[in-house]
Amino acid sequence: MSRAIGVDIGGSGIKAAIVDVEKGDFDGERVKIATPRPATPEAVVATTREAIAGFPADLPVGIGFPAAVLDGTVMTAAHVDPAWIGFAGTPAFAHAFERECTMLNDADAAGLAEMRFGSGEGEQGVVVMLTLGTGIGSALFINGELVPNTEFGHIEIRGQDAESRAAASRRKADDLSWTEWAALLDEAIHRLDLLLWPELVILGGGVSRKAEKFVPLLTARPRIVPARLLNRAGIVGAACRAREVL
Ligand code: BGC
């Protein structure tokens, strides 16, 4: 069995598990610790170290992070402390963990897992995965190959970021009905369609568990399917990346 540790750093929680990268599933329990506030680099590195402390020391670590990540350096900070911008994350995590690690965008990690083990399995052409949570993350695939660090959650719709209109958090914050929220999401997917003309759109994030409440209400042209790995995708994809590159 080939294993690696996957970590998913989010606005509210830092989640980690050992992953069987051949099966695309957890090998044991998931650990979850609240994201420290403020979520400065030092605090997040220390909390993540705590989250993985009980896992075997010889496994490489893949970290999904909610920002564009270029060569291990965090480039943006939509939902994390601005101190992350320009922070060399990979060496800081590797130093703290005393193990090899790699970092990638959280939605890219989730997309990799869905393409390999979930709703995107075997899909060719242009596929977009959107993760619907606090923000909207995106992952773009062309014939199964990831184009990293797309930030489609930030396309502008009616003068606002797509994610501030249509993220899953918006439904809760504004107490929207499923129909009201689906209309906002639908508009974002219509817009994305005009820019990319994808074959398939995969909708992930915790809300994909309730897909029957909103996917049938979407009218956008591409095939739209819910993610299959639900919120396991980010951890599984990050671990797969670690196994591949480390
Ligand atoms: C960030 C993305 C991230 C997404 C989901 C967005 O605000 O800009 O990098 O993937 O949130 O966490």
Image: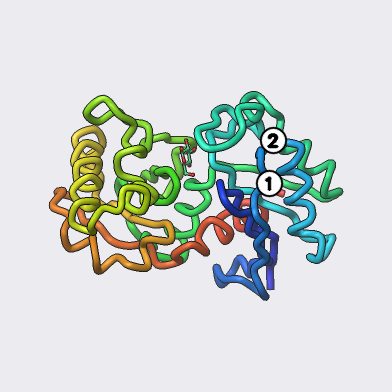
Q: Within 10 Å of the Cα at label 1, are there few (<14), some (14-19), or many (20+) other Cα atoms?
A: some
Which numbered tag is attached to residue 36?
1
Q: Secondary structure at mark 1?
A: loop
Which numbered tag is attached to residue 141?
none
Q: Quadrant of residue 190?
A: top left
| Amino acid type shown at disc 2 | Thr
User: Within 8 Å of ligand 1, the CB of disc 1?
Assistant: no
- Residue to which mark 2 is pinned: 40
- 235 horizontally vs 115: left or right: right
Percent from the top left, x then y, of residue 147?
A: 44, 38
Residue 246 or residue 149, whichever sits in front: 149
Residue occupying the point 79% across, 43% down: 94
Residue occupying the point 66% across, 42% down: 37
| Amino acid type shown at disc 1 | Pro
Q: CA distance from mark 1 to mark 2?
A: 8 Å
Residue 35 in view of the camera: yes
Q: Quadrant of residue 71?
A: top right
Residue 130 in view of the camera: no
184 above or below 69? below
